[in-house]
Image: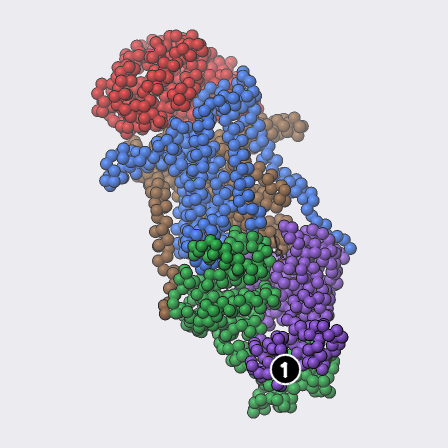
Chain colours: A red, B green, C purple, D brown, E blue
Amino acid sequence: PCLSADHTPDNAPATLPFADVAERARGTQVRWYMYGGWAHVNDWVDTYVAGEMKKRYNINLVRVPMDAGVFVNKLLNEKAAGKAVGNIDLLWINGENFKNAREAGLLFGPFADRLPNVEKFVDPASVSHDFGYPVDGYEAPYGRAQFVFEYDTAQAGTPPADLAALKAWIMENPGRFTYPQPPDFTGSAFIRQVLYAVTGGHDQYMAGWDPDLFAEKSPLLWKWLNDIEPYLWQKGRTYPKDSAFLDTLFSRGEVAFGMSYHPSHAQNKIIEGSYPDTARTFVLRDGSIFNTHFTAIPFNAPNKAGAMVLADFLISADAQLSKYQPDNWGDFPALDLERLPEKERERFRAVDLGPATLGSDVLGPLAVPEIPSAYLEALEQGWKAHVLDR
Amino acid sequence: MDLELRHIGKQYKRRTILEDISFGVGPRELVSVVGPSGAGKTTLLKIIAGLEQPDTGQVVFSSPPTRENPVIIVFQDYVLFPSMTVRANIGFGLRARKMDRDLIRKKTDQMLEYFQLAAQADQYPAQLSAGQKQRVAIARAMVVNPAVLLLDEPFANLDRNLKMETARFIRNTQKEFGIPTVSVTHDLAEAFAMSDRIGILLNQRMEQFDTPEQVYFSPASRAAAEFLGPVNRIPAALARQLGPDTGAAGENPDQELAVRPENIKITPGSGPGRITEKTFAGHYFAYTVELDTLKLMVYCQDGRFKTGQTVSLKLGPGVV
Amino acid sequence: MDLELRHIGKQYKRRTILEDISFGVGPRELVSVVGPSGAGKTTLLKIIAGLEQPDTGQVVFSSPPTRENPVIIVFQDYVLFPSMTVRANIGFGLRARKMDRDLIRKKTDQMLEYFQLAAQADQYPAQLSAGQKQRVAIARAMVVNPAVLLLDEPFANLDRNLKMETARFIRNTQKEFGIPTVSVTHDLAEAFAMSDRIGILLNQRMEQFDTPEQVYFSPASRAAAEFLGPVNRIPAALARQLGPDTGAAGENPDQELAVRPENIKITPGSGPGRITEKTFAGHYFAYTVELDTLKLMVYCQDGRFKTGQTVSLKLGPGVV
Amino acid sequence: MSLTVNPGSGKGARLLLGLSPLLVPYLVLFCGGVALTVCQSLGIATPLPHPGGLWDAYAGLISDPAFFASFGFSLWVAGASASLSVATGAFLAYRVWKLPRQLAPLSLVYKIPLILPHIAVAFLVLIFWSRSGIVASAAHSLGLIQGMHEFPNILYSGWGMGMILAYTLKGTPFAMLLALALLARFDVRQIQTAAMLGASGPRIFFAIVLPRLAPALHTGFIILFLYSFGAFDIPYILSESRPGMLSIHVYNLYFKHDLARRPEAMAILTLMFCFAVVFIVAYSRAVARLENGGRKL
Amino acid sequence: MSLTVNPGSGKGARLLLGLSPLLVPYLVLFCGGVALTVCQSLGIATPLPHPGGLWDAYAGLISDPAFFASFGFSLWVAGASASLSVATGAFLAYRVWKLPRQLAPLSLVYKIPLILPHIAVAFLVLIFWSRSGIVASAAHSLGLIQGMHEFPNILYSGWGMGMILAYTLKGTPFAMLLALALLARFDVRQIQTAAMLGASGPRIFFAIVLPRLAPALHTGFIILFLYSFGAFDIPYILSESRPGMLSIHVYNLYFKHDLARRPEAMAILTLMFCFAVVFIVAYSRAVARLENGGRKL
Ligand SMILES: Nc1ncnc2c1ncn2[C@@H]1O[C@H](COP(=O)(O)OP(=O)(O)OP(=O)(O)O)[C@@H](O)[C@H]1O
Ligand SMILES: Nc1ncnc2c1ncn2[C@@H]1O[C@H](COP(=O)(O)OP(=O)(O)OP(=O)(O)O)[C@@H](O)[C@H]1O
Ligand SMILES: [Mg+2]
Ligand SMILES: [Mg+2]
């Protein structure tokens, strides 16, 4: 039941058996705060997820669009104000925002391990860290994404195969390439991608923050980025504000390459009609970063039971499959397919990702993990200092 | 330059203010318009200036006013520019004409001097007395040599001496440069003294338009006569009795004579009048004299008579 | 109720406007203050009303004014409430006193009637003529029965008839309710006619403060005399020659006599004077008469004399 | 001789023409924007081909009671906050204007809140006025209240008090500035005269000062009302879930990153826009009738 | 007998006291907010414990030339857009005010842009004025330009033209409304008199109308300047990367970076706030000196 008074936080779900939790959640409302910039994702949540939640648990799902940075700040302020019962039940979160939220004590948990679908179908190793920060059960896996480039076969011939080729291409075709300005999520991922490629791979960074290493390696990255800058869109005087802006530039043909942290992004755009049917994706030989995204519950969620039920449903095979369909979203499952019953596994295999999305056969071998978030912050700050404000 | 008004008519919200007003003002001529408060005098000036549209009729100039030779109106409430000093207000018209700086300075200084405003040159209108504002407004208008000059109560807030000097200045300038001038005023003495012709605006119409003496001594109507000053109505029979000097004393015995207070002479005597009221009014005394049932108003420079005293009366030469 | 000013002094930006002004106004008394434009008359009224702080001195009331019995000032530029109709303006003070609605209606209707504003009752100030505004301001002040009444040029924009009626109304009300009243005016005739006492403000000081006749005939100084009207200065020797009626003709032969223009009589004759200028001024004519090197101003009701004519002169009884 | 020609005729047209070099880029932009919005609300020129009929989006809205609830609630919040801002602003402006000269520099203080962005004000309201917020804590430690429950539940009363508070805080200095701009040229003798005639402080304020301020206050009201009605920054932080603000609804539908997503969002926007136009026209008419013509000047 | 007491003394204090019930909740809120900001900029009461020294954040900023570049650029954008808005607004207001009565309803048009939120205006500017935007396309199809590259690169000129355009579009009707509020009580005879005295249209505008509008325009300038200086809605869409707007920098620090950098964000906010205060004081002083005292009324 939804609590009306705002002075008694209900933390019982953390200890109750899941069946009781589900019982408590029945007939309640769950408010899910999530990034709202993708119409198809919003659609999927509003129709499929909301429908299933209603059908299965009689739960009313309310989707509230909000950038992760903003709701983290909202929670920070609520915490500062001592607001024990807020109005957010579930968050879609990962990486730096998760780290921020954890460090500021904004999250409820651990709860992830108590979700039956996590217990049964998720490989604990694959979700033990989020951008190098321990998860500790404070967030439940929800999906998986991998960085890809986009191009239009009707415009460009064969895309560059590796970063060196990309650089050469950029210099030969001035004004036809750009990347979103960090700290935009996608732009930030692009420079990490470049960092791995120009400094000799990702392994060296996995041990955690090492200032000396960073000081030694990062100049290579800055040099690479500064080398291409004069050849970028608008001569590098300005960068697209965010990835949506880059999408627009790409769709209008102002630049030759798009990029996305979601492999199915191009396919979605084709379906939506804003990309030409000839748009395709590619990855560079140097590797392609992947990450897992999660759901988490705020410390002052009014309906923690409902939030847990929703989080559990989202990682269920049904939801993950539906999400995997390119018409719906095309987001890669966070499940360990090996742990699924054969029949279910078959259904995943049967999904046609569409011509623009690369299969896991291409993506899998090139996947490299995300960098620990301390590097991420340092990279974003360094980019401003060494590239933008140079 | 001269101007002519032809059958001007004006209404405000269906109430007729002016009806069929026609008169002309020649060059070098100064016309005063007098009339009761609310008669439409200001409205008439605005119509001449082109700031109000008449409902009927038209104003015709011998040569159309231009920016260099404008029709200038000095408003009853001055309408000074509040954000400019006195000096800047007066020089405004000259600056608008892109006149040489030194010349502007010289001309405004002359005006400041003439209108005794030198001490206030750098004050803003909000810091002026009413009379000072009025002088600034007049100076601002006069400095640009207007083609036609319209003055709305130009002396209302000036003391006697300033009034005389200002009137003389306006009169001289106007004569010298041939500026037809229309002045609206409540000060009848001033109107009589300075005007070539006087128009009496009464009951929406121009009741009379003539020289001052004609207007005063041969008013077109009883209303006009009474507007210009108190009039004693004396039955013809009585008048014959009083008046050895009466000119054309009434042929008709029922007729009344209209006599102005200054045209009755009081002499000490035993009757038939008795003084019931005496007021001091500066250069004359106003006596109320009872004569049978009649109450007569008499202006007389002699202050020796007292209330209650019986006196004899004589009609003077001028009968209205 | 009476009021007293004690040694009032006031400066604006180091320029002294008023210096050591002291006088009293008794109940039922009406005092007129006259003086040249910019002399500080308005400033003085504001000080009495408590709207300006004097730099020195104080204003003392026999009983302190309250909200019910206020000091009311009628400003030279009226200060009507622009967003209220004439009726609402006049009734404002009554509404502020939470008077009964019907009574307010009745009282304002009376005032509207009296001041001939009935037709304008529902107009806004911006739609009134200047004289109408002035009457609204006076009516608005009179309707609340003030404890002290201060009038700044109350008649400046009224025609002769309205002026007389308004003056009479103010005088009667003021006498009846014992309201000490100070009126500032440029209209000397009106000031002489209606005031109990007159104060002449000249050169920052109250030059004279006395009854009208005293002020007119026994001015405290030459400046005061000249302010009230033109003065002819005639050497005592000449005066003796002209004046059979001279009272105390100068003992000292070098002394000059000051004679007002209405105190010189013109009679047809062969000299010694010659008329050089003649102006018509309504109920009198102003003649300029040359007498040797002297130019004399003579006011005379007789209009028969012509410019160029030689005339004899006689001094009248009143000598300043 | 020549006649004075009345300059009336054709003057308006010439004036409009004179305005055109300034107005055209303006009109192009705004008309363009509005046209785009209306088209998309009809399913024309949407990025995504629109399957349904022209009026689908509108039909959907009109049959939805929640839409009207939101609409009404938005009206309430906008109306209440704009009225409060204007009233407080006018009053404070008058008091500040009356401050003696020496205190005038102090009056700068009131301009400072202007720099705080709306969103910051929203956070501040949240931090200070929630039941567990700073004010409640202060009241508790001062012993004014025994527990948090006694503190009035301002932010979640169901009446949008939090939003109204935030908008009012932001709107008041704005209204004040407007009113002070008009008071700068106000003749103090108006007030002195009214006081002399026996008017009390409140009467002077209502009968003399308010009419003088009216044009600024009407202007201020329109601006604040429309802003509160259409903005989503403060509701973003402070809105309660039910009833929701219309702007948040639109925001949910469309705001993110791409202007044109959905006919429904655009239909709401179109309706809001129409409402704004109707509101401005109706309000101006009402004011004009109230002030009946001649009162100008 | 009793003396009239001069009411001067202690009046100011009493007035301030009278204001207090209205001012206190206000001051609590704003002072509270400011205090929190300042504290956090010093590393006190931050969400995460702050390891460094008190002045670290400020030292970091002051040694960073990019900060000053951003600061200067924000100043430029705010100054240019506020000046443009005020100038255009004053001029349009005057022209609208002069429209004959029959055309008065038309003048409602200018109020309508007020309802468009800033962000929508930003989008409109983007859609219309980018090199691949509607205006460029129109120019192309009209044959005015041969290709996209001939269209002036308004949005990415490095001078913040896009933002200035958007802020000006939004600010102009605001300044107009302000100016019209003052003109509502303007005596048309002032203009008639000036014209009679031979003043040309521009001279009348500059010598007579502008001084009359001055208080509103100064007020408008302050509001618009501070808004453009501090807001991030329009820069969010239209800002170029280099030089960046200060507000975007704060926004990124606040929402997109590590919590550990909170002191830095707050230090910038504090500096911006200080600047706003200094700006208001300096501006008001300058205006007061220009208008030298007595000109009131
Ligand atoms: N805008 C207006 N609307 C309605 N009536 C008006 C308007 N302006 C003037 N009037 C009326 O027209 C009449 C004439 O006004 P006008 O100002 O011309 O009088 P006036 O002769 O100048 O009077 P005064 O000597 O008092 O200045 C007055 O009765 C006045 O009430
Ligand atoms: N605020 C002010 N600042 C500076 N000087 C002022 C101010 N107000 C008035 N004065 C000056 O004080 C003097 C007296 O002004 P006041 O208005 O009292 O004159 P007044 O006697 O009423 O004149 P009038 O008969 O012309 O109305 C004038 O010279 C005027 O310029
Ligand atoms: Mg008049
Ligand atoms: Mg005066």
User: Visible in this render: residue A76?
Assistant: no
Q: Residues within 10 Å of mark 1 (few under 14, many from 20)?
A: some
Residue E280 screen position, x and y as percent: 53, 37
SS state under label 1 = strand
Residue at 35% x, 16% y: name it: A223
Residue C319 screen position, x and y as percent: 71, 75
Q: Chain of mark 1?
A: C
Nearest the eye: D19 or D240: D19
Residue C272 screen position, x and y as percent: 63, 82
Task: Give the residue pinned by disc 1.
Answer: C272
Q: Quarter-wise, where is residue C141 in the image?
A: bottom right
Task: Say which quadrant the N terminus of chain D sits in.
Answer: bottom left
Q: Is residue E102 above or below residue C217?
A: above
Q: Is residue A194 left or right of residue D117?
A: left
Count the marks. 1
Nearest the eye: D170 or E95: E95
Residue at 49% x, 53% y: name it: E186
Residue at 41% x, 23% y: name it: A389
Residue B266 screen position, x and y as percent: 68, 83
Nearest the eye: D160 or D4: D4
Q: Is residue A297 left or right of residue B276?
A: left
User: Visible in this render: residue C206?
Assistant: yes
Q: Is residue D7 above or below residue A126?
A: below
Residue at 37% x, 49% y: name it: D19
Q: Is residue B188 left or right of residue C10?
A: left
The type of residue carrying mark 1 is: Pro
Q: Quarter-wise, where is residue E277 in the image?
A: top right
